[in-house]
Image (spheres, rainbow, N blue to C red):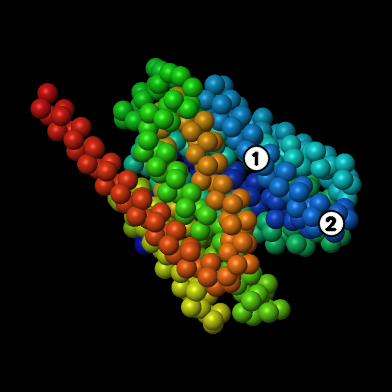
């Protein structure tokens, strides 16, 4: 228990500021969870129209991420984070003056684009500030900050939605500005170049565009494909699981899904320090493989679940997988990317395995229509297991490769 909390001591000061800024920004992230309701109830759009606009806003994250990664590698991480946060904040504040007008939709899309630029740049900055042995802890600290904010943000948004919609936008903008001010004054700039000492050969700076760099590192591509399977399975939390609960519990399905989300959030906040402390010495890729195994158990058990207590128990299991995956996937990518291309790789790879969130509703929707919502969990078990096996194979191959390199160096 002691090591679970002492592991966060001794990190660079900038990381504590970044985690605090992320917690503040996440606590004020009122619009994202309420966007569909804003479009339908406040603006009077149909569900179909709202769906198109939510998709458009979500897809704006993609060019934002790619552009942010390129600019961060070129001009520096801190500059891009600050510019993106200020533009995002101004967009939200403008929306607050016309909270029920469709004229604010372009500003919403701009804000989403800026959020896309912030995520890979922040990941690159955390990587710049930490040696490989501290990265799991550093990413888990950022992950904790995000979840602390998310635990209260949607709740506050729910109270503001009915009569104070303008303060949802203004609150989102103001908390983003507060986060930007913290980063402006207390976080150092970072932009590794060819003269920056790399922690290992895998992180050494290289020349050229990002695509040849990725093709020269097939292990990153294999990791991304395996992680796509796990992300696809995790996405069932937001699509198939609500439908399963509605199927079993009728009108109480939505309420029970709320309980699932509450248990998920509490588990993340209470157990993340302990999970990271217990798995700190295990190779990141084997931790992600373990996440896949926990998905097999946690999501797979839903196939047989009929009691709400069983659903809550399985939630704890797959949430442990979420913790392992979220913190170790970033650490693995960070330790296998050249520092000259960190932000770009951090923008491209998460987008690829993040496509699992976009494809999951479409594919599983057809499965549910053709079979039943219950059969989804058998497919999830198989896909999670495949992802876990691929991760394990990749980890074993990497250890074997490292031993061969070490043996060659000893012979010379």
Decide: is 11 above or below 405: below
Q: Farthest residue toward the front? A: 370
Q: Position of residue 329 (x, y in %)?
A: 43, 46
Q: Which mark is residue 157?
A: none
Give percent across and percent down for residue 51. Answer: 75, 53
Determine the CA span between mark 1 and mark 2.
23 Å
Can you tell which mark lies on residue 61? Answer: 1
Q: Is residue 97 left or right of residue 204?
A: right
List the residue tagged with mark 2: 46
Mark 1 and mark 2 in contact? Answer it, CB < 8 Å: no
Q: Nearer the viewer, residue 55 or 372?
A: 372
**Residue in view at x 34 percent, y 30 percent:** 202
Find numbered disc 1 in the image and state the secondary structure of the residue it sits on.
helix
Q: Is residue 293 visible?
A: yes
Q: Residue at x 36, y 38 (%)?
A: 219
Image coordinates of residue 242 in percent, x first then y, are 63, 68
């Amino acid at each position: 228990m002691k090591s679970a909390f002492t592991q966060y001591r001794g990190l660079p000061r900038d990381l504590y500021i970044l985690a605090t800024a992320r917690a503040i920004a996440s606590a004020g992230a009122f619009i994202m969870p309420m966007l569909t309701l804003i479009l339908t109830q406040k603006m009077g759009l149909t569900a179909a129209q709202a769906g198109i606009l939510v998709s458009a806003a979500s897809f704006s994250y993609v060019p934002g991420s790619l552009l942010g990664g390129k600019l961060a590698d070129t001009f520096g991480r801190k500059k891009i984070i600050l510019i993106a946060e200020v533009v995002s904040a101004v967009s939200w504040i403008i929306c607050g003056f016309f909270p029920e007008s469709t004229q604010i939709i372009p500003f919403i899309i701009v804000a989403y684009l800026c959020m896309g630029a912030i995520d890979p740049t922040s990941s690159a900055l955390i990587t710049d500030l930490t040696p490989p042995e501290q990265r799991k802890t550093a990413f888990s600290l950022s992950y904790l900050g995000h979840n602390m904010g998310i635990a209260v943000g949607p709740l506050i948004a729910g109270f503001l939605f009915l009569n104070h919609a303008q303060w949802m936008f203004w609150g989102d903008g103001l908390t983003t500005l507060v986060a930007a001010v913290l980063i402006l004054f207390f976080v150092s700039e970072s932009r590794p170049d060819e003269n920056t000492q790399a922690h290992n050969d895998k992180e050494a700076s290289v020349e050229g565009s990002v695509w040849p760099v990725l093709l020269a590192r097939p292990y990153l591509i294999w990791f991304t494909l395996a992680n796509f399977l796990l992300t696809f399975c995790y996405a069932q939390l937001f699509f198939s699981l609500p439908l399963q609960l509605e199927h079993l519990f009728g009108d109480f399905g939505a309420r029970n899904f709320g309980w699932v989300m509450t248990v998920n959030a509490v588990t993340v906040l209470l157990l993340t320090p302990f999970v990271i402390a217990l798995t700190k010495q295990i190779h990141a890729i084997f931790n992600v493989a373990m996440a896949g195994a926990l998905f097999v158990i946690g999501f797979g058990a839903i196939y047989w679940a009929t009691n709400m207590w069983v659903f809550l128990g399985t939630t704890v299991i797959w949430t442990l997988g979420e913790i392992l995956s979220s913190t170790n996937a970033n650490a693995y990518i960070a330790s296998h990317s050249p520092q000259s291309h960190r932000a770009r790789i951090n923008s491209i790879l998460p987008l690829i395995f993040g496509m699992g969130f976009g494809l999951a509703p479409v594919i599983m929707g057809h499965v549910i229509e053709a079979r039943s919502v219950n059969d989804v969990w058998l497919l999830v078990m198989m896909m999670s297991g495949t992802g876990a096996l691929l991760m394990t194979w990749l980890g074993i191959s990497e250890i074997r490769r490292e031993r061969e390199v070490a043996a060659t160096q000893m012979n010379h």
